[in-house]
Image (cartoon, rainbow, N blue to C red):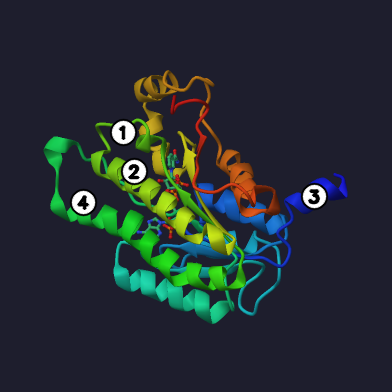
Amino acid sequence: MNNFISSMFDLSGRTALVTGSSRGIGRAIAETFSRAGARVLVHGCRESDVLREAACACGGIPVAGACGGIPVAGDLTDSAGVEALIEQVRNAVPALDILVLNASVQRYVTLDEFDEAEFLREFQANVGAAFRLVQAFAPAMCERKHGRIIIVGSVNQFRPSPRLTVYSATKAALVSLTVNAAKSYAPHGVTVNNLVPGVILTDRNAEALKSDSYRGMILGQIPAGVFGEPGDCAGAALLLASEAGRYITGIELPVTGGMHL
Ligand SMILES: NC(=O)c1ccc[n+]([C@@H]2O[C@H](COP(=O)([O-])OP(=O)(O)OC[C@H]3O[C@@H](n4cnc5c(N)ncnc54)[C@H](OP(=O)(O)O)[C@@H]3O)[C@@H](O)[C@H]2O)c1
């Protein structure tokens, strides 16, 4: 690859936190950032072999007790877990250049099944934690006049599934956060964008997609005719995180094979 193209996507010297990167889409993003030169903090809900293995896969700068990426943990359904994550990040690195808010929780809840506890759990993990993490790390990005925030949405913010009423509402709320933060931070060299996956094959939907009839029904809603892979989201994330994306802010970027249309 020529130098001009590689410099557009080079993340050397950058430090990134990718929440929910022990598995799935987050892991693909973390590995890609690492290959582009970033030092990556790899996050899971809890400490686990899967988290340590994912951190190891993120080359970069070796750190004592870890190989490659830096593992951090915290359950985002609990505000104490969010604070614990913030503290681990602050202890591990001086500042973040890139913040990817990828972790989320979901449960199949129809309108008829509305349940306040589940509503609060999903809004805390998907929206409350996002507000808090932006609040914790964006001011230092603004001071340094550089930063990239990527908030991961869902095709459900365009086409809310009746089976995922609460989850869909959390993802719609994140669009508002994206736009607000983008406007607030643009004068300080910080971009904020919403990366919107369609149906991507991960642990999250593996069980549901075992059913041939459900699989066929969902596939019928994807104009591209195929499900996405985690790596399909990584290129879009690299664009938004790198110099190539410096003038892109406040957008919803669908990676859906056309399912959002
Ligand atoms: N997959 C899709 O089809 C799809 C479609 C649309 C949008 N999305 C969005 O894309 C993002 C990633 O989805 P994915 O399918 O890659 O997810 P996934 O495979 O389910 O990955 C789960 C990740 O989130 C972490 N996590 C789970 N519960 C958590 C909690 N309570 N607190 C903190 N972290 C938690 C897990 O950590 P542990 O390993 O410790 O459990 C793991 O790192 C999510 O925001 C999702 O809404 C996905």
Amino acid of disc 1? Pro
In the rendered structure, find residue 172 and report the number of the disc placed on it. Answer: 2
> Which residue in the protein does label 4 denote?
119
Density class for disc 1 (Cα within 10 Å; few <14, some 14-19, many ≥20) is some
Label 3 lies in ligand 1 vicinity (Cβ under 8 Å): no
Q: Earlier in the sequence, mark 1 or mark 2?
A: 1
Q: Earlier in the sequence, mark 1 or mark 4?
A: 4
> Which residue in the protein does label 1 denote?
160
Question: Would residue 98 be seen by someone viewing this image from the given angle?
Answer: no
Nearest the viewer among 168 and 44 is 168
Amino acid of disc 4? Phe
In the rendered structure, find residue 6 and report the number of the disc placed on it. Answer: 3
Identify the image quadrant of residue 261: top left
Q: Secondary structure at mark 4?
A: helix
Whole-number angstrom distance, CA of label 3 to CA of label 1: 38 Å
In the rendered structure, find residue 32 and report the number of the disc placed on it. Answer: none
Q: Give the percent coordinates (x, y) of residue 115.
A: 14, 48
Q: Give the percent coordinates (x, y) of residue 172.
A: 34, 43
Whole-number angstrom distance, CA of label 1 to CA of label 2: 9 Å
> Measuring 46% from the left and 52% from the top, which residue is drawn there?
151
Amino acid of disc 2? Ala
Amino acid of disc 3? Ser
Density class for disc 2 (Cα within 10 Å; few <14, some 14-19, many ≥20) is some
> Measuring 42% from the left and 18% from the top, which residue is drawn there?
220
> Measuring 66% from the left and 76% from the top, which residue is drawn there?
63
